[in-house]
Image (cartoon, rainbow, N blue to C red):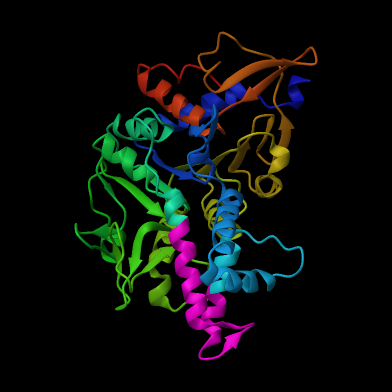
Amino acid sequence: MSGFAHCPYRQSSLLQQALAPNKMRIAFLLGAGCPMSIRVDAGNGNTAPLIPDIAGLTSLVATTLTAEAELSADYTALIGRFGVGASPNIEEILSHLRALIDVVRDGDINGLTKPKLQALDKRICELTAGVVGVPLPGEGTPYHKLAAWMSGIARAHAVEVFTPNYDLLMEQALESHKVPYFDGFVGAREAFFDLSSMETDILPARWARVWKLHGSINWWRTPENDVIRKNNGDGADRQMIYPSHLKYDQSRRLPYLAMLDRLRDFLGRGQAILVCCGYSFADQHLNEVIMNGLRSNPTAMCFGLLYGARSQYSEAILCATRQPNLSILAEDGAVLGTLNRNWNATSQDSHSLHGVAVSSVTENDIEQCKFGLGDFKKLGQFLAHQLNQSSDVGTNHEA
């Protein structure tokens, strides 16, 4: 049956080889699953993810707002607009909320006036920032391992990190390892967004690039419509998280569009490797950018590393069965060259990546191989393993 299954060891070696050349253009897309891989003490002997997923964040926001007397009725009215039995997530709520702000003018919709809607928007952003604004616990997290890997090899091209997350975890890890980075902003006290610097991009390759696709908890829009990066906003500043992808005027969309343009540019030219981790391919807008880039440039390659079984990721599977240079690698199988197959069950205990990227388990007396790099924690260990190898190790495992 091996001819009808994919080999997890071969794919692990191919990924290692793809990331090895110092002249390769490499980027990582880190989704919401990445901070979830870091567990912290939740009391009573339990642990919890450092930052919850979107469902957990939505639940926390809902619980808090319904308990606040001044906003409870307005929040209930807003959610009621989604219909009976609907369960919108926080990003869908923000999208609808901001659409209402754009059309309500001086009137009201279901009793929701523009000031009430703006108050809800501000409070939701405050609550979100409070949840995702946590620091990394310690120095050994996967983010730190990625930062160490980025700085461990002299490169011809800067390593780029794209993320739809609003947190500052990647920035903290880079600063911890003294890795200089550029995120589109220039300055110190109130760093300003500088599109020209992004477009010319003449900084040294040792500077990492960090692109926040959905904004960040330290992005603020001033009353003068300037976009700045600072720790805390003034009363009139508006926090810029989640762009909603609505038909905003150009000035309001600019930072988000510029970040997406960097992803388009990365995938659209030359040999390029994009490694996605913690990203479920549920964002259709972001998928469109990735798929168009891969279609326009056959020499680009995207590795989608998924946590758990691939049956949970129908959209990712659909994308990969249509695009041969998108490889989806999950715990129980993969879509490679548009072919969706299980992993070969034969364990290769002597392989250098056994126990690093691939493990062997026995379930119901049947041996199975499991691919582990969809777990960001495992990916960090994989990158540390590669960094610690001598230059000729990791390229000797022929595919």
For the magenta stretch, what is the residue range?
98-127
Location of residue 308 in the rendering, given as x and y in whole percent from the top left corner: 65, 34
The residue at the point 37 percent across, 41 percent down is: 135
Location of residue 222 in the rendering, given as x and y in whole percent from the top left corner: 31, 73
Residue 51 in magenta? no
The image shows residue 214, relative to residue 385, as above or below, that is below
The image shows residue 245, relative to residue 382, as above or below, that is below
**Pick the front one: 194 or 156:** 194
**Pick the front one: 76 or 22:** 76
Query: Could you say which quadrant of the image residue 145 lies in?
Result: top left
Q: Can residue 214 be seen in this view?
A: no
Q: Residue furthest front?
A: 69
Image side of residue 193 versus residue 27, left or right: left
The image shows residue 166, relative to residue 242, as above or below, that is above
The residue at the point 47 percent across, 45 percent down is: 29
Location of residue 180 in the rendering, given as x and y in whole percent from the top left corner: 24, 43
Quarter of the image for the C terminus: give it: top right
The residue at the point 31 percent across, 54 percent down is: 183
Q: Is the magenta stretch mostly helix, strand or loop?
A: helix
Quarter of the image for the N terminus: give it: top right
Image side of residue 275 versus residue 284, left or right: left
Q: Which residue lies furthest to the bottom in this view?
A: 106
Image side of residue 114 versus residue 170, left or right: right
Query: Could you say which quadrant of the image residue 380 lies in?
Result: top left
The residue at the point 76 percent across, 67 percent down is: 84
**Pick the front one: 226 or 74:** 74
